[in-house]
Image (cartoon, grey):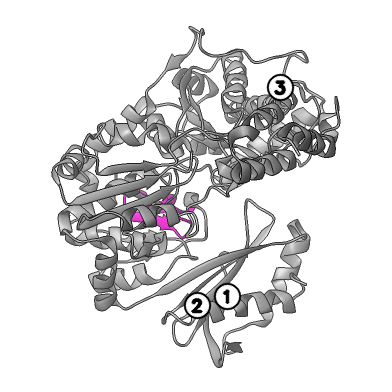
């Protein structure tokens, strides 16, 4: 059967002509991407046509989102065309403008936003950007239109990463940033991330205000000001300020190098002159693909290898997250090289998550965060505590104890680090996000990459060897995590998860072939059960997806699998899993 005949069948299966709401464009796109992978680029024209239909839905959809808009820890996420489209993005932006008006009479909200009045916010302005998702530029144009209509100055960054946009907020003294991204979610998702003047994730009072004002606009049947609205390109506009966001990031790192000890120019120069070091970076087609060459000052050494650095809004059909399976291309490339020092990294679409390998050992943020902390403390002579979320490996706890320092261990969410910004040397979470003192309060893959480069160059040691050195000194830790999609959500899910309260201190739990006693419980975020041998498991609902997540850590390499199975068994016993 020809491409044309096969594609005709697929379009008939998933597309209802002139009825976007009844059409399932992303199921169609996934099928077409699969065919492209199996049979070649002849399928690309049909993928393009499917995206043309989706673009029409994004621009013309006048319905409400299929799921109510709700801002959480990392903003709002939803399906492109069905949840995230021009009208919904305009109303969310209008809701943000309404929040600033509310702040004129709410001193507490104004303080959280970092402004004294809505007039000040309008003068300071907003940084606007988007990741590589389909329709990002069109939706960004609609956001810009609303902000300009409401009197806000606009700094337009175009396609960029979350950490870079946060640095731009601080360097420009802007009131807030909007990044149109669903982070590492699959190809069908769009998103809307809001950071206030401190450039970090917004507090619940702020996100609740955005949600409330937005829902009021939907309830009133608002169309954003013009039912016939079609966003125009920003290319010819003279009422916005265009900014080079990566240069602002570099300026910030340079300015604060004495605080965190990461000297950008020196690190890049040392790499350029280090003939026995190779660096492989996989952008998975995300926004970082635009920055890697410039970050490395357009290195001509041939020892900087950039994978999946081309544009592809389908991500080749994979889930675009820093994971072991997605790391394989980096590992294979490193193993084909002869250099002594090897550094590999994979970065998610909006550049706020990163994972490392040296070709032999994969380094997740569980270990890497502890390694950066030790490096800054011992090699850079920086003193201070370490901050890590409760779901993160206790390797950092052991390192801090050995160094005579404290640990700040809040619930999951980068915004939880705000009490120790400027005090903790490093703050990181298990889902591959990190930042350092003197940098942004937002997770940033690039500052993690710079720290990794500095470690390898300064210590003349691959990351895997450095990890082993710390394990010999502070003990070995073997973390893992997983997540399972569930049909329950909201209060119904929380009610089921509350049944885990039957697992109390002193309870015997069967883990593999062993019976382990719970010696401690931490309930600041889900339920973390710590056993007498210092292994642990933790269960919590996802804040961004219909999933229950569980995290485990064993003190021996064979024990993590048994802990994962125990967590699944617990969820089955309480009725979350069938």
**Marks 1 and 3, how far apart in space?**
44 Å
Q: Secondary structure at mark 1?
A: helix
Q: Which residues are magenta?
A: 416-433
- Compared across the picture, whether 155 is left or right of 100 comes to left
How would you rate the neighbour count of disc 1 (Cα within 10 Å): few for under 14, some for 14-19, many for 20 or more? many
**Is the Cβ of the residue at disc 2 closer than 8 Å to that at disc 1?**
yes
**Marks 2 and 1, how far apart in space?**
6 Å
Taking the magenta stretch, the answer to whether it contains residue 421 is yes
Mark toward the start of the polypeptide (3 vs 2):
3
Asked whether residue 251 is in view, the answer is yes
Expressed as whole percent of the image width and height from the top left, the position of residue 502 reads 68, 82
Expressed as whole percent of the image width and height from the top left, the position of residue 471 reads 29, 75
The residue where tag 1 is placed is 564
Locate residue 428: give its quadrant.
bottom left
Query: Residue 59: which numbered mark, if any?
Result: 3
The residue where tag 2 is placed is 560
Residue drawn 45% across and 49% down?
A: 353
**Marks 3 and 2, how far apart in space?**
47 Å
Asked whether residue 424 is in view, the answer is no
How would you rate the neighbour count of disc 3 (Cα within 10 Å): few for under 14, some for 14-19, many for 20 or more? many
Residue reaching furthest front?
1
Residue drawn 54% across and 23% down?
A: 118
Q: Is residue 416 above or below residue 63?
A: below
């Amino acid at each position: 059967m020809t491409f044309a005949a096969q594609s005709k069948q697929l379009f008939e299966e998933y597309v209802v002509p002139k009825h976007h709401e009844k059409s399932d464009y992303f199921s169609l796109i996934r099928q077409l991407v699969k065919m492209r992978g199996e049979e070649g680029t002849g399928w690309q024209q049909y993928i393009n046509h499917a995206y043309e239909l989706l673009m029409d839905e994004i621009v013309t959809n006048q319905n409400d989102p299929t799921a109510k808009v709700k801002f959480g820890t990392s903003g709002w996420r939803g399906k492109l065309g069905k949840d995230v489209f021009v009208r919904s993005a305009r109303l969310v932006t209008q809701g943000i403008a309404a929040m600033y008006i509310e702040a004129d009479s709410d001193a507490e909200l104004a303080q959280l936003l970092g402004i004294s009045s809505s007039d000040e916010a309008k003068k300071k302005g907003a940084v606007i950007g988007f990741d590589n998702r389909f329709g990002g530029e069109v939706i960004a144009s609609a956001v810009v239109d609303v902000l300009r209509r409401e009197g806000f100055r606009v700094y337009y960054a175009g396609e960029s990463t979350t950490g870079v946009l946060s640095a731009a907020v601080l360097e420009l003294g802007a009131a807030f940033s909007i990044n149109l991204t669903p982070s590492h979610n699959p190809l069908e998702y769009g998103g809307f991330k809001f950071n206030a003047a401190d450039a970090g994730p917004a507090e619940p009072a702020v996100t609740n205000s955005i949600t409330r004002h937005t829902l009021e606009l939907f309830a009133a049947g608002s169309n954003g000001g013009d039912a016939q609205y079609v966003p125009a390109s920003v290319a010819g506009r003279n009422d916005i300020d265009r900014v080079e966001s990566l240069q602002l990031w570099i300026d910030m790192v340079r300015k604060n190098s004495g605080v965190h000890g990461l000297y950008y120019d020196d690190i890049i120069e040392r790499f350029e002159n280090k003939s026995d070091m190779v660096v492989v970076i996989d952008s998975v087609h995300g926004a970082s693909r635009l920055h890697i060459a410039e970050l490395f000052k357009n290195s001509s050494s041939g020892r900087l290898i950039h994978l999946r650095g081309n544009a592809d809004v389908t991500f080749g059909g994979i889930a675009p997250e820093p994971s072991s399976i997605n790391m394989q291309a980096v590992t294979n490339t490193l193993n084909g090289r002869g250099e002594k020092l090897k550094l590999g990294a994979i970065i998610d679409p909006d550049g706020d998550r990163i994972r490392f390998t040296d070709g032999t050992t994969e380094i997740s943020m569980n270990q890497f965060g502890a390694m950066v902390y030790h490096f800054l403390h011992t090699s850079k002579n920086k003193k201070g505590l370490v901050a890590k979320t409760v779901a993160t490996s206790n390797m950092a706890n052991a390192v801090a104890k050995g160094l005579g320092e404290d640990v700040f261990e809040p619930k999951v969410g980068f915004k939880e680090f705000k009490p120790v910004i400027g005090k903790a040397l490093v703050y990181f979470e298990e889902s591959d996000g990190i930042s350092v003192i003197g940098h942004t309060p937002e997770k940033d893959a690039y500052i993690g990459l710079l720290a990794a480069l500095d470690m390898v160059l300064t210590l003349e040691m691959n990351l895997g060897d450095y990890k082993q050195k710390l394990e010999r000194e502070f003990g070995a830790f073997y973390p893992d995590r997983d997540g399972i999609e569930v049909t329950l959500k909201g209060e119904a899910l929380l009610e089921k998860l509350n049944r885990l309260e039957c697992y109390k201190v002193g309870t015997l739990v069967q883990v593999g072939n062993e019976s382990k006693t719970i010696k401690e419980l931490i309930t600041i975020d889900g339920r973390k059960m710590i056993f007498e041998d210092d292994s642990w498991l933790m269960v919590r609902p996802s804040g961004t997806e219909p999933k229950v997540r569980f995290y485990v850590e064993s003190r021996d390499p064979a024990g993590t699998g048994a802990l994962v199975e125990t967590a699944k068994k617990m969820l089955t016993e309480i009725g979350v899993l069938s």
